[in-house]
Image (cartoon, rainbow, N blue to C red):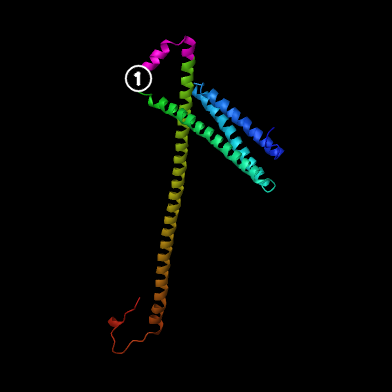
Amino acid sequence: MDPFSAVSEELAEIHGEISDIFRALSNGFQKLEKVKDSNRQSRQLEELTEKMRECKRLIKEFDRKAKDLESRNDPDTNKMLNEKKQSMIKELNSYVALKKQYASNLENKRIDLFDGGTEGYGEDNVLLASTMTNQQLVDSGNRMMDETDQAIERSKKTVQDTVNVGTETAAALKAQTEQMSRVVNELDSIHFSIKKASQLVKELACEPKQQGHQGYSRISPTSNDSEITLEC
């Protein structure tokens, strides 16, 4: 009998789901070791990663339910639940580490595709090809071309993203340049208006003085015509 059933049927059900996922992860990684195709490995690794996410969610749910029952359980039961939680976390972390190792190996294979492999790689391929059937050679060639096409598509996407960023940056700079040009034109217009206004003020200031000299000026008997001057 499941020891968790005596504590809570809900806890027992969650524990059962977690155990099923651990069995699926174990079988999945065992099968993954036999897969040679990088694309299939990547797809299976994504499926296993999704199972690990679900397992993490269930462990959190297990811990939450255990804490809800903590006040009703005896100390030994709470200790057992906590130890089980720690054990499940440890097991999940081991699969996470295994997943990271496979992901790193896949990434190294993609790098080798661009770098051309290590020294002697071509000779190894010649020896390997000599032992393969025509169909195996065709399948291997198609697989390599598919992997190369995928790598090229990723590179093209990166280039297109870079071009888009450059285009947006150029558009922003153009808009800023046009805005600065408008500001300069407005400043020129303001400067001209101020200059014109200053000229008008100067003319208006001179006009009353001229009228005063013409209508009300007195000429001293001793003054000469050549000594009469106007300030403006």
From the viewer's perspective, is 218 left or right of 93?
A: left
The image quarter containing residue 152 is top left
From the viewer's perspective, is 133 left or right of 217?
A: right
Q: Which residue is located at x 44 percent, y 47 percent?
A: 173
In terms of secondary structure, where does tag 1 sit?
loop
Whether residue 188 is situated above or below residue 87 in the rendered picture = below
Within 10 Å of disc 1 (Cα), the crowding (few <14, some 14-19, many 20+) is few
Taking depth in this image into account, of 187 and 27 the one nearest to the observer is 27
- Which residue position is annotated with label 1? 120
Total number of numbered labels? 1
Taking depth in this image into account, of 121 and 146 the one nearest to the observer is 121
Whether residue 163 is situated above or below residue 23 in the rendered picture = below
Q: Does the magenta stretch mainly form a helix, a strand or a loop?
A: helix
The image quarter containing residue 115 is top left
Whether residue 148 is situated above or below residue 81 in the rendered picture = above
Amino acid type at mark 1: Gly
Q: Which residue is located at x 44 percent, y 40 percent?
A: 166
The image quarter containing residue 188 is bottom left
Percent across and percent down for residue 164 are 47, 38
Q: Write down the region rendered in magenta.
A: 122-138
Taking depth in this image into account, of 48 and 42 the one nearest to the observer is 48
Question: Within the magenta stretch, is there residue 133?
Answer: yes
Q: Which residue is located at x 35 percent, y 19 percent?
A: 120
Quadrant in the picture for the N terminus: top right
Percent across and percent down for residue 16 are 66, 33
Q: Which residue is located at x 41 percent, y 14 percent?
A: 128
Percent across and percent down for residue 112 are 41, 26
Percent across and percent down for residue 80 are 62, 40
Question: Within the magenta stretch, is there residue 71?
Answer: no
